[in-house]
Amino acid sequence: MDGVKGRVCVTGASGYLASWLVKRLLLCGYHVIGTVRDPANERKLAHLWRLEGAKERLRLVRAQLLDEGSFDDAIMGCEGVFHTASPVIKPSFDPKTEILEPAVKGTLNVLRSCKKNPSLRRLVLTSSSSTVRARDDFDYKVPLDESSWSSVQLCETLQVWYALAKTLAEKAAWDFCNENNIDLVTVLPTFVIGPSLPPDLCSTASDVLALLKGESEQFQRHGRMGYVHIDDVALCHILVFEHDGANGRYLCSSTVIDNNELVSMLSARYPSLPIPKRFLQLDRPHYEFNTSKITSLGFKFRSIEEMFDDCIQSLVEQGHLSLHTAHQRPTFKVAV
């Protein structure tokens, strides 16, 4: 542990990424106020109370993302706020009402509570790389960077509601923080891979589990994707919070890879799993990400092999997946 530090707030603390962020913040010595929907839900929160330092420096409080003022008490007095919570996005008959408005409203509710807190030094918002790459007017020979924004019109046309919700929410956050002089930094992760601390798998981890079990429909739709280790995403959040010179947006991605290359690597690495050998080729744009902004701060990403090794090991240990050699890490390496 680095020694006891100040107090910070993590919204949606029991979530897939937020749980890792809480873990890392506690290990760094922070006092953490985590917001959850039901602090009395022992089953859902037990993994947080088992974290090192939790009994001494973790407090969980009730907050509802769409209730205005709900985050006031949790945020007041904190020097940092990590806003990771977002409404659950499901298929909808009325995406504007059920997806887009809640995403923006939830973000603005948290930001209004931040505005009331004179102790706030910096707000770190978890956005998404989908706010960068959903566009059809870029040069595929030039890697996308933080200056790129997804096209709202294209997202609406293609009904890509997750990317649209994340884009509108992040833009609303920048507008609000610029108007109210709040120091905002946003982190834009790609597809997050790694061990799940919560007992229930989120949609991301469930998609990975389905792929490893040979149920590949969701990954077939993904096409070319960026991937990043969940612990790296947590560490990126802390780095941009602590680094005085950090500003603006930060892409957070280790590797961009076509799904055919991904399953080729995984099926060779884990031959006992029914992973498909290849997918039908989709007509998707080729792109890369320029992550020099975060790496210029000294950050080094873990490899795609390591993130999937850690993820698979966790799924086996939690009983979600059967692997004959679960106690051994594979030694076969595939260049990607």
Image (spheres, rainbow, N blue to C red):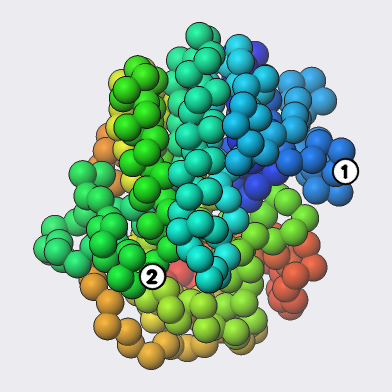
Give the residue at x 46% y 54%: 100
Quadrant in the picture for the C terminus: bottom left
Q: Is residue 72 above or below residue 40?
A: above
The answer to whether residue 240 is visible is yes
Give the residue at x 78% y 62%: 318
Report which quarter residue 181 is drawn in: top left
Tell me which label, 2 or 1, sits earlier in the chain: 1
Question: How far from the left and from the top, in percent, is residue 69?
Answer: 62, 26
Q: Secondary structure at mark 1?
A: helix
Report which quarter residue 162 is drawn in: bottom left
Q: Quick one: 262 or 209, which is closer to the camera?
A: 209
**Residue that numbered label 2 is attached to:** 159
Question: How far from the left and from the top, in percent, is residue 156?
Answer: 33, 65
* Mark 2–mark 1 distance (CA, rounded to whole Å): 37 Å
Checking the image for residue 151, the label placed there is none
Amino acid type at circle 1 is Glu
User: Is 264 displayed left or right of 40 in the figure?
Assistant: left
Q: Is residue 315 above or below residue 280?
A: above
**What is the crowding at mark 1: few (fewer than 14 residues within 10 Å), some, or many (at least 20)?**
few
Give the residue at x 25% y 58%: 151
Picture mark count: 2
Front tag of 2 and 1: 2
- Asked if marks 2 and 1 touch (Cβ < 8 Å), the reply is no
**Residue that numbered label 1 is attached to:** 42
Quadrant in the picture for the N terminus: top right
Q: Secondary structure at mark 2?
A: loop
Most distant residue in the top direction:
118
Q: Quick one: 237 or 277, which is closer to the camera?
A: 237
Question: How far from the left and from the top, in percent, is residue 114?
Answer: 51, 22
Amino acid type at circle 2 is Gln
Give the residue at x 14% y 58%: 142
Report which quarter residue 193 is drawn in: bottom right
